[in-house]
Amino acid sequence: MNWDDPSFQYPGRLNAAGVLLDNAVSLSGWGDRDCLVSGDGEIRLSYGDLFSWSNRIANVLVEDLGLVPGNRVLLHCFNHPWAVAAWFGIVKAGGVVVTTMPLLRASELQKTVDKAEIGVALCDERLMGEMSKVSGDIRVVPFGGADAEDLLIRAAAKSDQFQTVSTAADDVALLAFTSGTTGEPKCTMHFHRDVIAISDMFLPTVKPTEDDVFCGSPPLAFTFGLGGLVIFPMRVGASAVLTERPGPEFLSAIAEHSATISFTAPTAYRGMVAARREYDFSSLRCGVSAGETLPEPTWKQFKQEMGLSLIDGIGATELLHIFISASGKDIRPGSTGKPLPGVTAAVVDEEIRPVPDGEVGLLAVQAPTGCRYLNDERQTEYVRKGWNLTGDSYLRDEDGYLWYQARADDMIISSGYNIAGPEVESSLLKHPNVAEAAVVGAPDEMRTQIVKAYVVLREETSPSDDLAVELQDFVKSDIAPYKYPREVEFVSELPRTQTGKVQRFKLREQTQSE
């Protein structure tokens, strides 16, 4: 990893909760400043409130539940201030947080519990139905309810003082599961120093101040959400609005709380444009997009209709957060940007040799954070010769900007041509009748593969054979004709992970069975 930069030389003893929360109160004097507010406005915690409640929760964990440093604690929750208090309580006590998304079912939770060897789980009362079905030697404590055993009721009776555990900077602070866009999720391990490093890498791009109000749609279990809604605002003394569901709840929260910085996916930014007359988004000064590539048509439409230049970024659960991006005048629409401070990126071939600028290859990254899978043989696939291989195909231009082409397994080879699915998707999205599009390679005896497009139409448009031909001709006129989708299938929705990423592997599997 890249640790030569003095900006990332952290002390040997470091607890992420101590840096982000304890120091905010004791050193920076931010105790009375707003820190977290629920989307409905019913729960509002200052930095001092969060400090006290996380201390109380840490005391419950240690005194009542027998937590010792290194124990793993499942946090099954919505995006909510009490969930963040629990997160900090776990980290303060030296525990390892394993946050899971609220939509997970019992079978999925069981896999997480087994893989991470969970002994204690803190669960939002409203999610206990699925959690109660999980088997094993696991103690589940609900929070947000009225029962005497509720975490918050127990915490209220505890001292609001707790000595944050002095962890090593390279002790594991959290386990994060990948979103499973290519199949079986992997479990990644991240150190206390990683939690701080991602903010020091990315904040120069966003340039937040203590007056900013962060808001976003990704779950806290998705590291994009953890960074954008907890770590980043708290690093600078800002506040965050936590909404439990994407869509209208998220959009209305921006308007009601005058949010200034948004973290969400391209789909949501397209939704903002469509809803701009229903909600007041005038408070926004910055929008960060990640989770999927940001199509150039989406960037241009948002700029035209909303007046903001969206910040695109590529991140990975394996590296914890965004590592390539650009902002302001450095943005080139369609390009992901350049490596962040402390990051080195290269475009390489299968032997990890650099390819010339302008040629497509694999993205390789070295950063202050890096991939560490928990008990997974795929570690040797992701990390090779000291580089993290993200699984993305990129090209670098002569100015050092990196241009996303496709996931490596989304590159379509048809009649000897390499066709990047996202380029075709971007072209389809320019058509006024197309709301969403996903492109994959379908088997073909003559061409090996053909380009197949799955298209979601706008509400006022009906699918037809004539429209399919119109879309094919539209793409031919927009990009090289050999890239056009030879098959167009209209669908009501695209398969997505719970973090909103399109699961193209499911579409590829579907083409195999047709």
Image (tube, rainbow, N blue to C red):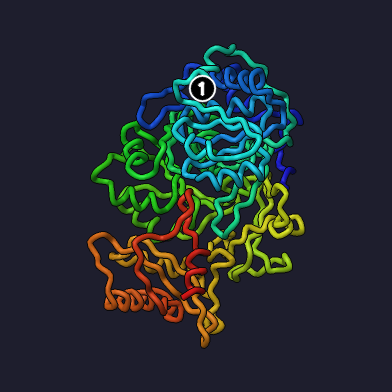
**Residue 7 shows in this picture:** no
Q: In this view, does 387 lie above or below 414?
A: above
The amino acid type of the residue labelled 1 equals Asp
**What residue is shown at x 49% (from left), y 34% (from top)?**
128
Q: Which sits in the foreground, 97 or 233?
A: 97
Q: Where is residue 49 in the image (x, y as percent from the top left)?
A: 50, 18
Q: Where is residue 246 in the image (x, y as percent from the top left)?
A: 39, 43
Residue highlighted by disc 1 = 150
Quarter occupied by residue 298: bottom left
Q: Is residue 137 left or right of residue 511?
A: right
Mark 1 secondary-structure assignment: loop
Quarter occupied by residue 287: top left
Q: In this view, does 104 lie above or below 48?
A: below
**What residue is shown at x 68% (from left), y 68% (from top)?**
349
Q: Which sits in the foreground, 208 or 482?
A: 482
**What residue is shown at x 48% (from left), y 73% (from top)?**
511
